[in-house]
Image (cartoon, helix red, strand yellow):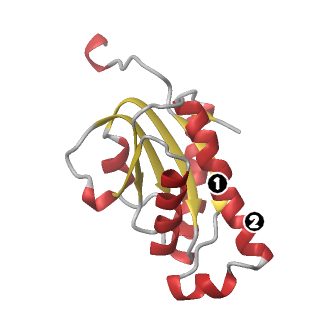
């Protein structure tokens, strides 16, 4: 039915998995450890993939879920700022009712429907977790995402 058909770019997903992210006081103690460095690398790699897909200079709104730690949110904001991307970074509970052409969703799925319904042109999901409660949601939704990919409604970018 033409009234319900959506035209545009097919949404994509990046499975980043465990991106680390201890509570703020723990981060200072672990920044030099190999595990933390690998997790940070996974987060940075995922953000770079998304930036490449979105296109250089594009205005992007990155919405992160409330399951991610404040330390991870700060890392994301710093990465976006350091790379001078034209991105706005907001927590999901700060973005009700707004819309944007290009939206990146970062997290394990907390209040995701509110966030993904904000994209007018392009949507990219970065499925990840950094704390135990997020891991459980990530594992549950990973199966759902795989089914959606099989249906051809979502494409994984690697």
Tell me if I can see residue 153 in this picture: yes
State the residue in front, 135 or 151.
135
In the rendered image, the residue lying farthest to the top is 2
Q: On the rendered image, what quadrant is the C terminus found in?
A: top right
Q: Is residue 70 left or right of residue 136?
A: left
Q: Residues within 10 Å of mark 2 (few under 14, many from 20)?
A: some
Q: What x and y, as percent, mark residue 49?
A: 64, 40
Left or right of 146? Residue 91 is left
Q: Position of residue 35 (x, y in %)?
A: 76, 74
Position of 146 relative to 29 (above/below): above
Secondary element at image label 1:
helix
**Residue ID at (55%, 48%):** 83
Is residue 108 visible in this depiction of the protein? no
Residue ID at (31%, 40%): 118
| Residue tagged 2 | 38
Q: Nearer the viewer, residue 148 or 14?
A: 14
Q: Which residue is painted at 59% across and 48% down in the image? A: 47
Left or right: 66 as drawn, with respect to 142: left
Chain-order first, disc 1 or disc 2: 2
């Amino acid at each position: 039915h033409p009234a319900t058909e959506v035209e545009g770019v097919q949404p994509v997903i990046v499975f980043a998995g465990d991106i680390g992210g201890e509570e703020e006081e723990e981060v200072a103690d672990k920044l030099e450890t190999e595990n933390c460095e690998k997790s940070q690398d996974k987060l940075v790699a995922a953000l770079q993939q998304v930036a490449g897909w979105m296109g250089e200079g594009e205005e992007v709104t990155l919405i992160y879920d409330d399951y991610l730690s404040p330390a991870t949110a700060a890392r994301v904001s710093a990465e976006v700022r350091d790379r001078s991307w034209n991105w706005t970074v907001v927590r999901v509970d700060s973005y009700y009712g707004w819309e944007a052409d290009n939206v990146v969703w970062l997290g394990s799925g907390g209040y995701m429907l509110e966030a993904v319904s904000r994209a007018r042109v392009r949507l990219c999901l970065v499925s990840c977790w950094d704390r135990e409660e997020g891991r459980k949601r990530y594992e549950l939704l990973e199966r759902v995402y795989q089914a959606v990919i099989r249906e051809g409604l979502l494409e994984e970018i690697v």
